[in-house]
């Protein structure tokens, strides 16, 4: 079955971030694989001991079948992460109560860029950046 997912990269806190997202959305963390479990690749240096427990992959179904996936991308392996303002994850819960709950959880320790409020297009909408630098929009037509 075809699907769309969002893939997030973190320097070294993917597991912490996904455990947090699990508290917001519920569900089971799946597909967990650590760098130390990967087979050695020909011509590549061995994984540093400090990186072996980091996540190569993790996933969590968050809302309406949408899957959030992630990986650690440590600088010790040549990754240079730059979280920017070029993307948001848009959530469309069924009710205002669920919108309020998700928004409060996601914005805790982060920053609210637009508080939840009734908008001219008829939605209850707000946006925030969570404590990991990921940008979220919460947009519901539900009452």
Image (tube, rainbow, N blue to C red):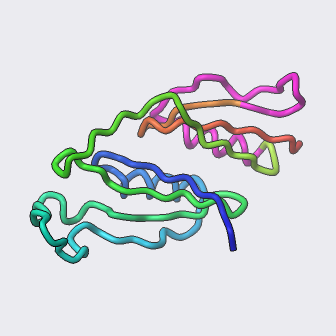
Residue 47: x and y in percent read: 14, 64
Estimate the x, y position of residue 49 in percent, counting from the top left.
10, 63
> In the image shown, does 15 or 35 lie closer to the viewer?
35
Q: Quadrant of residue 32?
A: bottom left
Q: How many marks?
A: 0
Q: Residue at (52%, 32%) from the top-left corner?
A: 129
Dividing the image into 4 quarters, which one contains the C terminus?
A: top right
The answer to whether residue 137 is magenta is no
Task: Please give the range of residues in magenta.
Answer: 97-125
Magenta-colored stretch includes residue 98 = yes
Q: Position of residue 135 (x, y in %)?
A: 54, 35
Q: Residue at x 41, y 34 (%)?
A: 83
Camera-nearest residue between 110 and 43: 43
Q: Quadrant of residue 140?
A: top right
The one of 85 and 142 positioned closer to us in this rendering: 85
Using the image, determine if residue 98 lies above or below residue 56: above
Classify 45 as above or below 127.
below
How far across and how far down the image is residue 8, in percent? 45, 49
Residue visible at 70% across and 40% down? 100
Above or below for 36 versus 71:
below
């Amino acid at each position: 079955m075809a699907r769309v997912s969002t893939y997030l990269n973190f320097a070294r806190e993917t597991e912490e971030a996904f455990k947090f997202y699990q508290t917001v959305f519920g569900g089971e963390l799946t597909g967990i694989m650590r760098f130390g479990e990967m087979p050695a690749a020909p011509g590549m240096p061995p994984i540093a001991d400090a990186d072996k427990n980091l996540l190569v992959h993790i996933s969590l179904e968050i809302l309406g079948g949408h899957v959030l996936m992630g990986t650690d991308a440590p600088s010790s392996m040549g990754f240079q992460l730059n979280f920017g303002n070029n993307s948001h994850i848009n959530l469309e819960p069924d009710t205002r109560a669920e919108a309020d709950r998700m928004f409060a959880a996601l914005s805790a320790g982060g920053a609210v860029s637009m508080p939840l409020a009734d908008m001219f297009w008829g939605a209850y909408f707000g946006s925030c950046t969570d404590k990991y630098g990921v940008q979220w929009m919460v947009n519901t037509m539900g009452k």
